[in-house]
Amino acid sequence: MSMSLLVFVPVALLFIVSGLCFVGCLLDSSAYDVDKPNPEDKPPNNYSDTDVLVDPDIVAAYWPLDEKSPTDGTAKLTARDALGANDGEYKHKGNAPKLFPCPAFQLAPGTDTAEEIGFLSLGAEAIVLGDAEQPPADPLVLKTGMQVRGAFVTVPYSATINPAVFTVEAWVRPEWDGSVPAYRAIVDSRDNVGGTIHGFVLWVNQAGNWEAAMADVDGNFLFATAGQAAFGETAYLAFTFDGTNAALFVNGVKASQPMSLPAAYSPNTTQDLVIGAGAPWLDDRMNSTGDNFFPIFPFNGVIQDVAIYNTVLVDSAIEIHFYHGNGKEVPAP
């Protein structure tokens, strides 16, 4: 093990542990036959506007991840922020070949990153069944998501997307089989300043559980852990932090034990936010001289409708997002 790894592991572990091939174009699977709501039922079908963007003043950024496949699979490709201020960029084997494949290796016992090839498919099968195209507002014409095996989105640093009080939400469908334990990052907005990691991450942990983690100014770390991720099944995740207390919701239900930071939250102040991979503070593979490099903790599956709010969504709003995102009305009490 190199000296750089010996230095990195004790620092990073404080926060980390407390095939397909790209063939020159992206795959467009928007025409896949999926289980969609019956238009005669007139279910909620405008999740993006009536739920996520109902009050744009509280939305820091919103990435639907519903872009279409380009004709040139090697080109720079924008992941649109629906509010327009924090667009991201898709990175995959076709347009960033030196970053892929992501190798599997162990940072330390119990802290593993999986091997993935850098595959990206846009226009992938919709997993948010209440998010139809507007117009025609037809529940059979759904917005799509991004399907990845190691590919990811980077969003340039902005204080706007790293608020002191927040909710981060995402719709995800894990597609690995769970036979190789490893961390799998969904949204990672962390940096490393002076040997201390700051910010938050939402991921599947080594044990296969949904988990969110964040840091305080004294280097203490909070982990909000929920139940097992169900492979092949869609889940709606929401992680809230009110300045003191944090909670992780899975499918509209508060699923973690209440957690409190001992001191003030310490947000990321320097690094990109990444959707679909982790550890953005590391040098990338092209520039690293050590044994650790970005990207690690690659996701394998579908990610759609990632949003960050500059407030805590109340429990009832999170429940509404879950039901409306599934194209259903909230059941009467």
Image: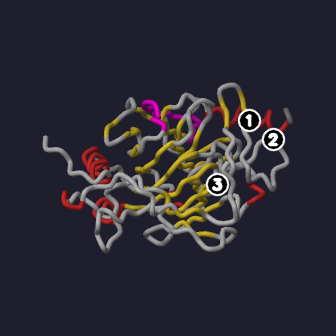
Judged left or right of residue 102, residue 129 is left
Which of the two discs, 3 and 1, labels the residue nearer the N terminus? 1
Which residue is label 2 attached to? 291
CA gap between label 3 and label 1 equals: 19 Å
| Circles 2, 3 touching at the beta carbon (< 8 Å) | no
Q: Which residues are magenta?
A: 217-231
Q: Nearer the viewer, mark 3 or mark 1?
A: 3
Residue flagged by tag 1: what amino acid is it?
Answer: Phe
CA gap between label 2 and label 3 equals: 23 Å
What percent of the width, then of the height, locates residue 285? 78, 52
Judged left or right of residue 32, residue 158 is right
What residue is shown at x 17% (from left), y 44% (from top)? 331
Q: Nearer the viewer, mark 2 or mark 3?
A: 3
| Circles 2, 1 touching at the beta carbon (< 8 Å) | yes
Q: Nearer the viewer, residue 217 or 95?
A: 95
Residue flagged by tag 3: what amino acid is it?
Answer: Phe
Which residue is label 3 attached to? 119
Figure quadrant of the N terminus: top right
Looking at the image, can residue 55 be seen? no
Which of the two discs, 2 and 3, labels the residue nearer the N terminus? 3
